[in-house]
Image (cartoon, grey):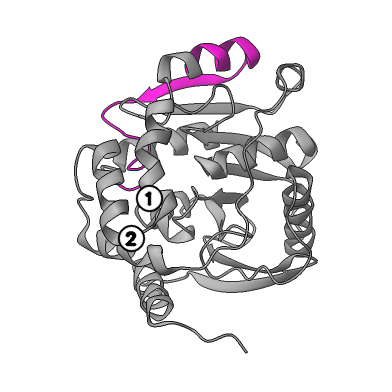
Amino acid sequence: MRVVTDGETAFHAAYEAMLRRWPADARSIDIPSAHGTTRIHVSGPEGATPLLLLPGGGTTSAVWFANVEVLSRSHRVYAVDLMGDIGRSVHDGAPLRRTADLMAWLDALHDALKIDAAQVCGHSYGAWIALNYALHAPHRVSRLALLDPTNCFAGMSPRYLLHAAPMLLRRTKESQRAFLLWETGGAPGDPQWRDFLDTTVSARRSKVLAMRRPKAQDLRLCTVPTLVLLAERSRAHDVRQVATVARRLLPDAAVATLPGASHHSMPTEAPAELNRRLSEFLAA
């Protein structure tokens, strides 16, 4: 029997505290699959258009605390803890070795939730998963929103990877704070979210896949209505290059930039404009 550390206990407590800020109707469910059990938080009217939210790596479904109230007014929101990453999903089944394994996991979620097709919104690593899923099963994705997607249209910035190295080699509260401060330009404005991020350094993860960029020919064949919303101050990649390639490979996509946003602060800091743009795109 695995022993739960004090750090994990603190993480779980902070995670639950963030969820208490969600709409009153929100509930948590666990969906079994061949890879393990997936924790999903559900909010919004039954029968409304389903919206799947996939978070960035290391943030869990809790990252949507500033967005879910607005999005769940018109959608049945399913906010997912990614299989293999930190959170309440438990990866105790089939291994995750390649992108196809994540696609099979998402297929199983759609089947278990009895969703024929959903709108899908992902941030960062979650956006990479969302885009690959739209390429894998376009009939199951009615609209696709990619928030500062990484390794989808261009590679990561070498400078970004260099600054991330100390945190990846030895993840501590101090190394993570220093990295996020460099990328975002300031500490998180929400103190509870800042405290939650501190606890994530002790959370367990099993397998976050290396992000292989989709092939250009596959992207050109994508017919799913897509929004690519980039963070103006993102240091994860060259924003102009990402926009240029996205427009070239997905000529029918809406490609725009969110003023003032950085990569890691995009869903949580000053969320009103993000919520407005997402709501307009998803309702179109």
What kind of element bears circle 1?
helix
First of labels 2, 1 by sequence position: 1
Q: Amino acid at mark 2?
A: Thr
Crowding around mark 1 (Cα neighbors within 10 Å: few <14, some 14 to 19, many 20+) is some
Which quarter of the rendered picture does the N terminus lie within? bottom right
Which of the 4 image quarters holds residue 179?
top left
- Residue that badge 1 annotates: 167
Label 2 packing within 10 angstroms: few (<14), some (14-19), many (20+): some
Q: Is residue 268 magenta?
A: yes
Read off the residue under disc 2: 172
Q: Is the C-beta separation of discs 2 and 1 under 8 Å?
A: yes
How many marks the image carries: the answer is 2
Q: Measuring 42% from the left and 14% from the top, which residue is drawn there?
A: 240
**Horizontal and vertical percent for residue 213?**
65, 28
Mark 2–mark 1 Cα distance, whole angstroms, equals: 7 Å
Q: Which residues are magenta?
A: 243-269
